[in-house]
Amino acid sequence: MDRSKYKYEWLLAAQLILSFVSPLFSSTVYGRLIIDIAITFVFVAAIIAIATTRKHVVIGLVLMVPTLLLTWGNNYYFMTSLKLIALAGSALFFCYVAWLILADIFRAKMVTLDIIAAGISVYLFFGNICGFLYALIGEIDPGAFNIPETTASYLGDSMGELSSAMYFSFVTLTTLGYGDITPINEFARSLAFLEAATGQFYLTVLIASLVGIHISSSNKSSESS
């Protein structure tokens, strides 16, 4: 089996696992450890997915290795500054991977299951990226988000926690808008608006692009026959 044909499916599987374990184990004793393991799987799957050229791999590793070292190091020696760098590095790495995957999608000649998985992966990356940024904002400005007491009882009272930031990010990306967490900081409000708009715009463009690719490939097949 040629695993390169399923690279985006493996990546999507890793992202779905992260999305599943993040809220499920966030309040447990080993929650942070489990989430970090899931994030590491996503990082590794992302490197495999973009390993089409040596340049992409080198840049990816330069962004990934220090970020993972800081992420894991914070479990044993916590420093706020190191956590901020790790969050920023994670967001930057995911931005780089999402950009490469998007380019791959628009270069595709036909719609395959792997290309569909790639499109969904980019959508999830949007949520991950904004989640890292919300956690970054929450760590820098603890008052950047209003978290009611009832919400804090199950999510915690700090958006500096990655599980809480990811929850808010995906609620915003999908425009569910539960209202249990409210951005107060100007940058946080702007990011929330941008994320919600980008999420809806992306889905529209993605569907249109995949339909266009499918029609184009179908026309070429009929002409050749």
Image (cartoon, rainbow, N blue to C red):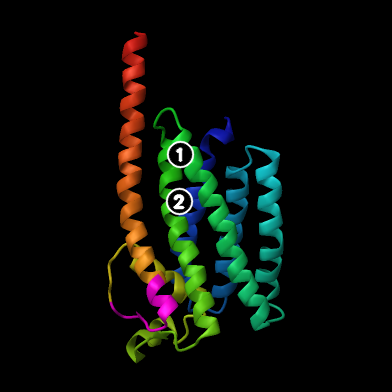
Q: Label 2: how many residues lie within 10 Å, few (<14), some (14-19) or many (20+)?
A: many
Q: Where is residue 132 in the image (x, y as percent from the top left)?
A: 52, 69
Q: Residue at x 66, y 51 (%)?
A: 60
The residue identified by callout 2 is 122
Question: Which disc is residue 105 wearing?
Answer: 1
Q: Where is residue 100 in the image (x, y as percent from the top left)?
A: 54, 45
Query: Which of the two residues, 145 or 38, is positioned nearer the viewer here?
Result: 145
Q: Can residue 161 be seen in this view?
A: no
Between the residue at mark 2 and the residue at mark 1, the CA separation in whole angstroms equals: 10 Å
Task: In the rendered view, tell whether residue 150 sits above or below residue 49.
Answer: below
Q: Which residue is drawn at 39% across and 72% down?
A: 190
Which residues fall within the magenta stretch?
179-190
Quadrant for the N terminus, please: top right
Q: Position of residue 77 (x, y in %)?
A: 72, 80
Task: In the rendered view, tell whether residue 161 sits above or below residue 106.
Answer: below
Q: Residue at x 47, y 56 (%)?
A: 125
Q: In this view, does 217 lie to the left or right of 6?
A: left
Question: Which disc is residue 206 wearing?
Answer: none
What element does badge 1 sit on?
helix
Q: Is residue 200 left or right of residue 7?
A: left
Q: Name the amino acid type tagged 1.
A: Ile
Q: Name the amino acid type tagged 2.
A: Val
Q: Residue at x 53, y 33 (%)?
A: 5
Query: Which of the two residues, 114 or 3, is positioned nearer the viewer here?
Result: 114
**Rendered image quadrant of residue 171:** bottom left
Q: Label 1: how many residues lie within 10 Å, few (<14), some (14-19) or many (20+)?
A: many
Quadrant for the C terminus, please: top left
Labels 2 & 1 near each other (Cβ < 8 A): yes
Q: Is residue 136 left or right of residue 166?
A: right
Q: Where is residue 23 in the image (x, y as percent from the top left)?
A: 43, 70
